[in-house]
Image (spheres, helix red, strand yellow):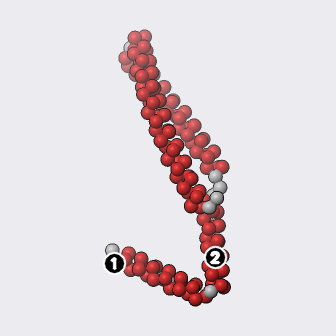
């Protein structure tokens, strides 16, 4: 899979996962909020308001730590399965060098014209940066 196609696929995949995750998180947070409120009301009848708030806060911290651990594990697994983008970028650069060598061997005048055009573009961008 070439670099542009891979980047496009990765961008679409990330956007879809972000959208799904946001919807699920909104629903889960609403449900969790209702459950926590019910738990605090029930616990406050048994122990008092201060103890109920302390216990609920501790439980929420444990939930946050579990979610962080699961997320970190999932990201490490996902990154381990992907091949390096550096190797693909080097492959594209190598392909570009081979194509440039092929064009130079086939028709040196086109290669000279392309080099002059690339120099002009580079000069244009370097001048516009130095003026700012």
**Residue contact between numbered discs 2 and 1, judged by CB atoms under 8 Å:** no
Q: Callout 1: few (<14), some (14-19), or many (20+) C-alpha neighbours within 10 Å?
A: few
Q: Residue 17 at x, y = what percent?
A: 52, 43
Q: Residue 56 at x, y = what percent?
A: 44, 23
Q: Residue 43 at x, y = what percent?
A: 43, 15
**Res 99 label:** 2
N-terminal label among 2 and 1:
2
Q: Is residue 108 above or below residue 46?
A: below
Q: Callout 2: few (<14), some (14-19), or many (20+) C-alpha neighbours within 10 Å?
A: few
Which element is circle 2 on? helix
Q: Residue 62 at x, y = what percent?
A: 51, 29
**Res 37 label:** none
Instruction: Answer whether residue 132 is visible to the viewer in this image.
Output: yes
On screen, residue 80 versus residue 45, left or right, reads: right
**Res 131 label:** 1
Could you tell me which residue is drawn at 45 percent across and 25 percent down?
Answer: 31
Could you tell me which residue is drawn at 57 percent across and 42 percent down?
Answer: 72
Q: Mark 2 or mark 1, which is nearer to you?
A: 2
Q: Quadrant of the C terminus?
A: bottom left
Query: Residue 107, located in which quarter of the rendered image?
Result: bottom right
Could you tell me which residue is drawn at 56 percent across and 61 percent down?
Answer: 4
Instruction: Answer whether residue 86 is visible to the viewer in this image.
Output: no
Could you tell me which residue is drawn at 51 percent across and 44 percent down?
Answer: 16
Q: Quadrant of the N terminus?
A: bottom right
On screen, residue 63 versus residue 127, left or right, reads: right
Query: Residue 40, located in which quarter of the rendered image?
Result: top left
Q: Is residue 90 above or below residue 26?
A: below
- Depth check: give the residue in front, 59 or 10: 10
- Depth check: give the residue in front, 24 or 75: 24
- Depth check: give the residue in front, 45 or 86: 86
- The residues bearing labels 2 and 1 have C-alpha atoms spaced at a distance of 35 Å
């Amino acid at each position: 899979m070439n670099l542009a196609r891979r980047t496009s696929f990765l961008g679409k995949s990330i956007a879809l996962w972000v959208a799904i995750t946001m919807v699920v998180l909104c629903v889960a947070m609403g449900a969790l909020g209702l459950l926590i409120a019910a738990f605090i009301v029930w616990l406050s009848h048994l122990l008092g308001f201060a103890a109920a708030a302390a216990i609920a806060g501790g439980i929420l911290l444990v939930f946050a730590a579990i979610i962080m651990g699961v997320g970190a594990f999932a990201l490490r697994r996902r990154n381990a399965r992907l091949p390096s983008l550096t190797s693909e970028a080097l492959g594209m650069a190598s392909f570009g060098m081979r194509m440039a060598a092929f064009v130079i061997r086939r028709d040196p005048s086109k290669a000279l014209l392309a080099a002059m055009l690339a120099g002009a573009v580079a000069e244009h961008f370097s001048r516009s940066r130095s003026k700012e």
